Amino acid sequence: KNEVEQSPQNLTAQEGEFITINCSYSVGISALHWLQQHPGGGIVSLFMLSSGKKKHGRLIATINIQEKHSSLHITASHPRDSAVYICAVRSYTGNQFYFGTGTSLTVIP
Amino acid sequence: GAGVSQSPSNKVTEKGKDVELRCDPISGHTALYWYRQSLGQGLEFLIYFQGNSAPDKSGLPSDRFSAERTGGSVSTLTIQRTQQEDSAVYLCASRLPGSYNEQFFGPGTRLTVL
């Protein structure tokens, strides 16, 4: 049983397309994170959310606490957005983080 | 401005040998995490250190795994009698105290057990 589920697992888009990656979780959380991992590269934190919506450049993250669901949107996608996007939640009952298996995004020029 | 650093970046070892992986967190970050990322798998929590509190070891997969954090800074993850299934990327992350501070990840150590 996975505490965090992401969809889709793989996503290919044409440059300029609007992209949505979804994350659902089953545990009570204190915060949700969206992470980005480039091939052969390290992990970078994109957003940390506990409610509502955050925007950074072409990236938008939303969370619905009641529905235990979050979405990451990329507007006007670009090939440099190609990476694995990982949803992670911190359980409010402890120190543990639970991770989704990631969504592999490829943006084609 | 140093981020989280890890060493070595790559480690190849033979089955049965012990390995030590090192993490240098960002200065002032009292919280430190170790994670494992196996090929094709998601990140897996291993252990969490917060200041001088007893570490949360609930994610360690077996008693062959242990970790220390000396002086509240550098941490070492030790795997004894390595097995092939231990092959993975081991990631360290640190953050400031408080539930709402983001984690900063190191580049990872890729461990290959032959």
Image (tube, coloured by chain):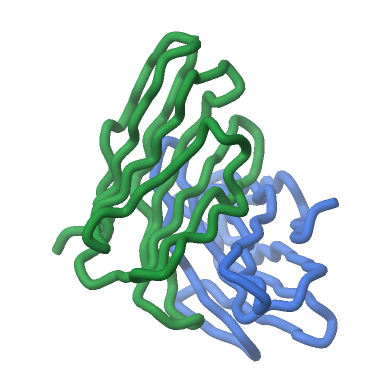
Chain colours: A blue, B green
Q: Is residue B100 left or right of residue A74?
A: left
- Quarter in which the N terminus of chain B is drawn: bottom left
Quarter-wise, where is residue A22 in the image? bottom right
Please name whichever residue, B68 or A94, is drawn nearer the observer in this view of the structure.
B68
Above or below, A67 relative to B13: below
Above or below, A89 relative to B111: below
| Residue at x-position 61% and y-position 85% | A50
Above or below, B83 relative to A85: above
Please name whichever residue, A71 or B6, is drawn nearer the observer in this view of the structure.
B6
Instruction: State whether residue B21 appears in this view.
Output: yes
Give the x, y percent position of residue A92. 65, 78
Instruction: State whether residue A75 appears in this view.
Output: no
| Residue at x-position 55% and y-position 26% | B86
| Residue at x-position 75% and y-position 84% | A64
Give the x, y percent position of residue A108. 57, 44
- Figure disc tally: 0
Q: Is residue B114 left or right of residue B10?
A: right
Give the x, y percent position of residue A3. 77, 60
User: Can you name the residue that lies furthest to the left here?
Assistant: B1
| Residue at x-position 44% and y-position 52% | A43
Please name whichever residue, B107 or B48, is drawn nearer the observer in this view of the structure.
B48
Give the x, y percent position of residue B87. 52, 24
